[in-house]
Amino acid sequence: MRTRRSDLEIKSEADLAGMRAAGRVVAEIHAVMREAVQPGATGLELDAIARRELSARGATSNFLGYHGFPATVCVSVNDVVVHGIPNDTPFEPGDIVSLDFGAVLDGWHGDAAVTIPVGEVTDDVSRLLIDCEDALWAGIAAMQAGDRLREIGSAIERLIRSRGRYGIVEEYGGHGIGTAMHQDPHVMNYRTRQRGPKLEPGLCLAIEPMMILGDADTYTMADGWTVKSSDGGWAAHFEHSVAVTENGPFVLTAEDGGASRLAEFGIAAPIDLA
């Protein structure tokens, strides 16, 4: 049975199995959407795919209707950082498209994001995507039981600063996840003065660095959702839902539980939670 320690939801083994099932749904649907990101495709087409695939798996959307959001997936193109509303504008060669998508299965939430190039992109944009995804995995690798929340943001910032002069978005970050899509604690993507809570086995977090090829400043458009970079710099966003375990982090929304990427950090392949 899950418990509450302070404001954090700590999952039991059975709960984590449910989280893993929801995470698999997210991973599978992300894979389908990624294949559909081609020149000429549109955000509305991706939203239709997400709805169809959710229904086929007996899952529901945790995005649709959330504070009024009108779609099942956030589709953020080029200088849109997060929360882009799907529309009928075709993707063009050289664009980058961020897909932020989640699902609910048997009351458990999964949430993940990826930024995908549409065909060939410029070298600096290609490097932006590589560096942002690497920052995600650096943050995940820092999710060790007994350490403090601050270590995640420290690892993300350290990786980003080692790669170049990127803008690290500060207004948005990761979050706890479980019986709700957004729970405590908030996860910064940079080092903070506060150590934050201790990372306990059973705590699940969505880790999601957002980087801009330019300054970090952003603004929200008149639709109340679409967040764009203030200087027009293109942005990347990567995210996974991750469980803290006694044996290290387990990536709930990765097909392999994160084994292949975590091995790069010397972390042994996690035991599946299902």
Image (spheres, rainbow, N blue to C red):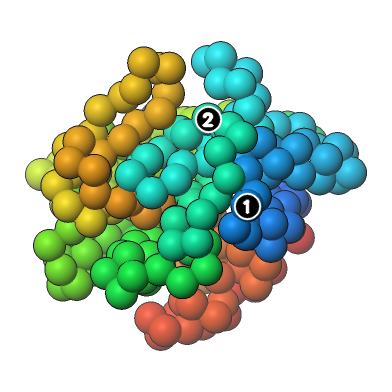
- Assign the N terminus to one quadrant of the image: top right
Q: Considering the numbered disc 1 on the image, is that residue within a helix, a strand or a loop?
A: loop
Judge by depth and name the residue closer to the eye, 140 or 222. 222
Name the spot of residue 105 as percent of width and height, x first.
76, 39
The percent position of residue 147, horizontal first and vertical second, equals: 30, 58
Q: Report the residue at 20% width, 36% height from top.
A: 230
Query: Do the residues bearing badges 1 and 2 touch, measured as CB atoms within 8 Å?
Result: no
* Amino acid residing under circle 1: Gly
Q: Report the residue marked by disc 1.
A: 40
The answer to whether residue 170 is visible is: no
Which quadrant would residue 31 be assigned to in this image?
Answer: bottom right
Disc 2 residue type (three-letter): Ile
Q: Secondary structure at mark 2?
A: loop
Q: Earlier in the sequence, mark 1 or mark 2?
A: 1
Image quarter hosting the C terminus:
bottom right
* Residue 63 seen from this side: yes
> Could you say which is closer to the camera, residue 34 or residue 243?
34
Tally the marks.
Answer: 2
Where does the image place residue 111, in percent across and percent down from the top left?
A: 57, 44
Identify which residue is drawn at 76% across, 44% down.
49
Residue at the (73%, 57%) spot, across then down: 32
Horizontal side of residue 97 vs 134, given as left or right: right
Question: Mark 1 or 2, which is nearer the eye?
Answer: 1
Location of mark 2 (residue):
85
Residue at 66%, 36% (x, y): give it: 44
